[in-house]
Each structure stands twice: as C-alpha cells, then as structure tokens.
Amino acid sequence: MKIIFHEKYYDSAYAHDPAAAPGRLDGIMDIVGSDSRFYEIIRPDPASEEDILRAHGGSHVQRIKMDRHLYELASLAAGGAILAAERAYAGHPSFAVIRPPGHHASADSCWGFCYFNNMSVSLLRLRAEGKIQSAFILDFDLHTGDGNINILENRRDGFRVDILNPMSGDRGEYIAEVEEYMKGLGEIDIFAASAGFDQGIDDWGGLLEPEDYGELGRLMREYSEKLCGGKRYALLEGGYNHDAIGNNMDSFCRGFA
C-alpha cells in the first residue's frame, strides 16, 4: 500500500485550527512506520501553479499566496494528492496522508480548514493528461465536501464526476448506502475517496467503528476492480481524535489495499 507523505505535513504553524493541530498525524505515521511490509512511504513534490489553477481562480490562488507559509503547505498537500492519483492510475492503490485538507475549498473560496481542493487538483491533472474522462468520489467525512461538489459536479467540459456523501445515521445503513450507490455506477475511469475520519465512534460524529472503515475500504477495492481495473486512491480530510485517527485509517487501508 502506497502512502504519500512529506515530513513538512507535520508542520502545524500554517494555521490555528483542529486540522493543523500538533500531533494530529503522528498516530497515523506511527502505524505506517511500524509495518514496512504493508506500507511504502513515497515523498511528493508541491503542485505547480498550473495544476492548482485547473481547480481554482487566479484571485483565490493569489489570496493564499499572500501567506507564504500557508501557500507552501497547501501546494505541497495538492502535490501529494497528485502523486496519489498518478500512482493509482498506474495500478498502485494509494493513500495520501496530507494536510491542509481540501474538500471545502471551492474555485474562488474556502473554509473548514481547507485552502486548495486537493481532490479536484489531482483529478483534473489526470484529465489534462488524457488519462481519465470520469471519476467516482466517496466522501465519507462527517461534513459534506461542498468544494468537491462545486468544482467537479455539473461541469460543462465533458468531465463526469459522481460524488457520494453518505447521510445515513445508522452504521449498517451507512455501509448499505455506500454499496447500493456503487452498484448503480456505470463506466468509471478511477475511484477516489475524500477520507475524513471525524465520523468515527470516538470522534465528532460518533458513528463508525474502525471495522466500518475497513468495510468502506473493501467496497472501494471491490467495485474499483469491477469498474476501472482497480484504479483507486484516497486523500486525508478530517479526523480530530488523535488517539483514534491512526487505527481508523489503518483499518480503511487494510480493506482498501
């Protein structure tokens, strides 16, 4: 399982919010680092401004650039997403342990601890390279990824993106909702997950157990193998209980790989 990570993601000085909190990524990377037979860490480069501008307007990019430190971290997160997408397209399931997160960043605005829409930047890079014409996104963060929707749904350029933000309030129904949606998918070129773990039983949402994240990963694996030759990747979004996020992410990846 490919893990996209850069040591600069540990830097918590770019903002003062729960996603930027010191120690938030430590539990994840402790698990990753303890199992080199399953996990392989790959170091990304920052996204270029050209890559970012496929998803965002120039004025938004310039606003983020006004804070040099923030721009450095946000462009590096977007670069991590691109690397995960490229590795996935080459046949290697990948999870990008990146921050800042991105699914609340729209073309010309952002909120919710997000700055650049990492998912949109990565998918639009693959499309610009002529590799994909469609994608499915499972966004299982507690909060609906309005930025993903605003940038990627209802496009006029022929790029088709199906997005599911599960809404069920029962564990079993939540998993069933995801599987039922996947059963109805048509031809898709790549699967991607906005992987927020704040819906966890010990996190803000108080709903999903670690094994439920494993089941979400398994469904992503099963249906991506059926529909697009197994091309799949995931990007870290939310998740704020530092003692739980590592186990939840590990459970997801065991099902996903």
Image (cartoon, helix red, strand yellow):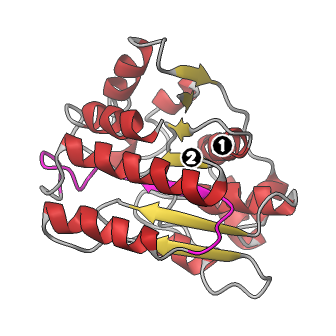
Q: Which residue is mark 2?
A: 233
Mark sitting earlier along the chain (2/1):
1
Res 100 seen here: no
The amino acid marked with disc number 2 is: Tyr
Which portion, as a residue range, is magenta?
186-204
Circles 2 and 1, Cβ within 8 Å, touching? The answer is: yes
Looking at the image, residue 142 lies above or below residue 32: below
Q: Say whether residue 41 is left or right of residue 239.
A: right
Specify the label residue 173 is tagged with.
none
* Residue drawn at the location 24% of the way across and 34% of the way down: 242
Q: Is residue 37 visible?
A: yes
Dot 1: what SS?
Answer: helix
Q: Is residue 188 left or right of residue 175?
A: right
Residue 126, percent from left and from top? 77, 56
- List the residue tagged with mark 1: 88
Q: Is residue 85 left or right of residue 168?
A: right
Question: Which residue does the image show at 52% across and 68% down from the upper left?
Answer: 110
Name the amino acid, label 1: Ala
In reply to whether residue 188 is colored magenta, the answer given is yes
Q: Is residue 234 magenta?
A: no
